[in-house]
Image: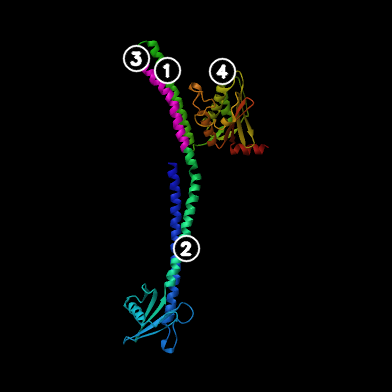
Amino acid sequence: MIRKLRLKIVGISVIAVAVLLVSVLAAVALSTRSQMVRASESRLQEALAGHMLSGAQPGSGGGQPCFVADIYADGTVRLAGSGYYDLDNDALILSIVQDALQRESREGVLQDYALRYMRQNGMLTVRLAFTDCSQEQATMRSLLLRMGGVSLAALLLLTGVSYWLAGFAVKPVQQAWQEQKQFVSDASHELKTPLTVILSSAELAASETDGGKSRQYLDNIHAESLRMKDLVEDMLTLARTESGTRLPEEAVDLSDTVLESALAFEPVAFENGKPMEYTVQPELTVSGRSAQLRQVADILLDNAVKYAEPGSPIQMGLRREGRNAVLWVENRSAPIPPEKLGHLFDRFYRVDESRTGGEGFGLGLAIARTIVQSHRGSIGCTSTQGVTRFTVTLPLAKNEVTKRGSEA
């Protein structure tokens, strides 16, 4: 599909430029031909205006060579003109004159002789002026060949450049396509385990006569169904956030939002033997959606509670740095290899690939990154000397920046 898209982009570009080049070529060719025809006709008009009886020789001066034939009523033909033409070939001249007289148009081209003619009817004679148009035709052929060659070379060059540039154009599409395929594959893999458990438990419950065991199988079905529900909700949240739909923004007291999250997770951390320590600078306001920003704080704290070393504290802070509000959550844990740090925010990614089951689906940090980016912020992670820290930077609301600036 990506290759077809790339070729389609190249095709559209080449066709568009080809139409433009053909239009320019046609315009130049028509303009050049029109100029040459006007020059020939002007020369023929000058030749027709000459007076043969006074001894003038039409077409014998400078410029495009021509000759004139006066045809009298008795059939006599009198010739005069430039020495460029062989006027002694009576049979050929007579054939040319007869061909021109038989034409209905008073001017035109005798293709068989490569001559342009113009006729003037007088009271006693018919005057015909002729000029060579072979040079005109040769010039047009040469012009078309040169321009055609240049256009063809330009199109070939354009095709190569377009194919190269199209590679850059489709790269985001290719990346999105790969991510979509990976997402479907990972989601299918995550759903496969609970579905297998549900189906197996349902079959066993249907064939089991012991009520206690049947109840156990039903509990398994219920637990795995809840697990599937959580996964589907996470995927829907991620899809909605990544869709780029702009929801109404409001002024959010980020300090209160972070405190609410910390107070909610404090008993959870205590039960896991991991005390929480947090310092939150008050009255930091950002523009966005309160529920989504609360979700970011929840995800970071939930991640810290899960993976912090037993008995080690979980620390969280919020402070103002310049025009930004900076939220950070850190915990002591096994160092995360540098090559894996860049993938922490990928969907369904786990540092420890063996972690499955109730330890999450690997969507939390991906959701957090998408929410932060939708709020024009950034999120990152560092892991050094046994301390893993997640940092979120969000721009303060304009009125907050103005207020702080005036206070300074």
Q: Of the numbered discs in the image, which one, if any, rests on residue 274? A: none
Residue 235 x, y percent position in the rendering? 46, 30
Residue 71 x, y percent position in the rendering? 35, 84
Displayed quadrant of residue 185? top left
Is residue 185 inside the magenta stretch?
Answer: yes
Q: CA distance from mark 1 to mark 4?
A: 24 Å
Q: Amino acid at mark 4?
A: Asn
- Can the viewer see residue 263? no
Displayed quadrant of residue 108? bottom left
- Residue bearing mark 1: 220
- Residue bearing mark 3: 207
Left or right of residue 57, residue 390 in this image: right
SS for callout 2: helix
Displayed quadrant of residue 236? top left
> Residue drawn 45% across and 71% down?
35
| Dot 3 and dot 4 residues touching (CB under 8 Å) | no
Is residue 368 inside the magenta stretch?
Answer: no
SS for callout 3: helix
Q: Which residues are magenta?
A: 177-204
Mark found first going from the N terminus, 1 or 2? 2
Q: Amino acid at mark 1?
A: Asn
Q: Of the numbered discs in the image, which one, if any, rests on residue 272? A: 4
Q: CA distance from mark 1 to mark 2?
A: 80 Å
Q: Amino acid at mark 2?
A: Arg
**In the foreground, 40 or 121:** 40
Q: Please determine whether, in this image, residue 99 is positioned above or below residue 178.
A: below
